[in-house]
């Protein structure tokens, strides 16, 4: 789960709204016994004792593995390397302090937007910087544009349109399950078995309200939940990442060496409906 604990909320959002949503996510994870790796942005936390306490609430939870997601969520493909390196180091200050009392390590890192650099030179250089600082760059296999559904969901809530809000949550859950089916089939095709999937989503209101239901549906497909350490021990995750560009797509595509085959695989990935995409693009303007 990325952008923990406050990054996805606008600056104007009252803290109790953020606290309530985070509480709800943690409750859902606890109830469904789902181990989660969280990728933290520390921007705006240090000046605020309540926000630090919220981060502590996450990090001290027994099901939570810690991860750095940089200080302020800048894109590694768009800024100078030295600035990105500073973002990595500035992003671990509070996390390390809190973790020192828990015995938990800080070894995972996830690039904002999953953009690991702008070209092969910067990607290799940043990878070696991360290695030097003891970080493992964290892959994912499934993500379902939850940020897009979140924007539509928030708009429906702001308009007090409960019918649209319910439609959006149903569309989000259906699309996520469709992607689980898709990547399960792809995994069977490519490896003859279903590899442990890593689902990437965000700390936002949509997941606060949907995660319990989503977890139940995934479970009913026959999945069980494990932590990031265990998932990454699978040999699928020892494969070479052949992609040296700025886009943030699934590791299934990065493990494909042939560019044409990768392009084909990318085209086959199910997308949210064009109507939802159009509505989202309109919101961004
Ligand atoms: Zn992020």
Image: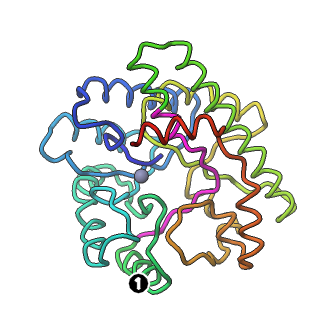
Which residue is situated farthest in the bottom direction here? Answer: 121
Residue at 78% over, 44% down: 181
Q: What span is colored magenta in the figure?
A: 135-151
Q: In this view, does 186 lie above or below 275?
A: below
> In percent of the image, x 74 and y 40: which residue is there?
178
Left or right relative to 11: residue 134: right
What is the x, y in percent for residue 37? 48, 50
Q: Is residue 215 magenta?
A: no
**Numbered label tally:** 1
Tell me the quarter of the image containing the C terminus.
Answer: top left
Measuring from the top left, give residue 29's x and y in whole percent: 52, 33
- Outermost residue, left side: 47
Residue nearest the observer in this picture, 192 or 87: 87
The residue singled out by tag 1 in the image is 125
Q: Does the magenta stretch include residue 139?
A: yes
Taking the image as shown, residue 220 lies to the left or right of residue 213, namely right
Residue 214: x %, y % from top left: 63, 30
- At a point 80% along the width and 57% down the height, the residue shown is 186
Q: Is residue 145 above or below residue 27?
A: below
Secondary element under disc 1, as helix, strand or loop, is helix
Q: Nearer the viewer, residue 170 or 86?
A: 170
């Amino acid at each position: 789960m990325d952008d923990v604990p406050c990054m996805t909320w606008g600056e104007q959002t009252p803290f109790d709204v953020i606290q309530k949503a985070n509480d709800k996510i943690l409750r859902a994870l606890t109830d469904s016994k789902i181990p989660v790796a969280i990728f933290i942005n520390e921007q705006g936390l240090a000046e605020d004792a309540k926000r630090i306490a919220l981060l502590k609430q996450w990090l001290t939870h027994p099901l939570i593995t810690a991860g750095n997601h940089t200080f302020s969520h800048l894109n590694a493909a768009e800024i100078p390397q030295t600035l990105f390196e500073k973002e990595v180091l500035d992003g671990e200050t509070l996390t390390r302090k809190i973790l020192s009392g828990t015995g938990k390590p800080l070894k995972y890192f996830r690039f904002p937007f999953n953009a690991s650099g702008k070209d092969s030179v910067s990607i290799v250089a940043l990878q070696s910087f991360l290695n030097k600082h003891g970080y493992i760059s964290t892959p994912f296999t499934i993500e379902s544009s939850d940020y897009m559904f979140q924007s539509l969901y928030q708009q429906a809530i702001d308009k007090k349109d409960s019918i649209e809000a319910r439609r959006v949550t149903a569309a989000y859950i259906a699309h996520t399950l469709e992607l689980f089916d898709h990547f399960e089939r792809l995994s069977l095709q490519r490896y003859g078995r279903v590899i442990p999937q890593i689902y990437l989503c965000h700390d936002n209101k949509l997941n606060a309200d949907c995660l319990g239901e989503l977890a139940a549906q995934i479970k009913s497909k026959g999945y069980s939940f494990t932590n990031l350490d265990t998932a990454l021990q699978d040999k699928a995750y020892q494969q070479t990442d052949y992609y040296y560009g700025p886009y943030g797509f699934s590791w299934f595509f990065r493990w494909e060496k042939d560019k044409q085959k990768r392009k084909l695989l990318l085209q086959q990935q199910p997308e949210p409906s064009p109507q939802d995409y159009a509505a989202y693009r309109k919101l961004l303007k």
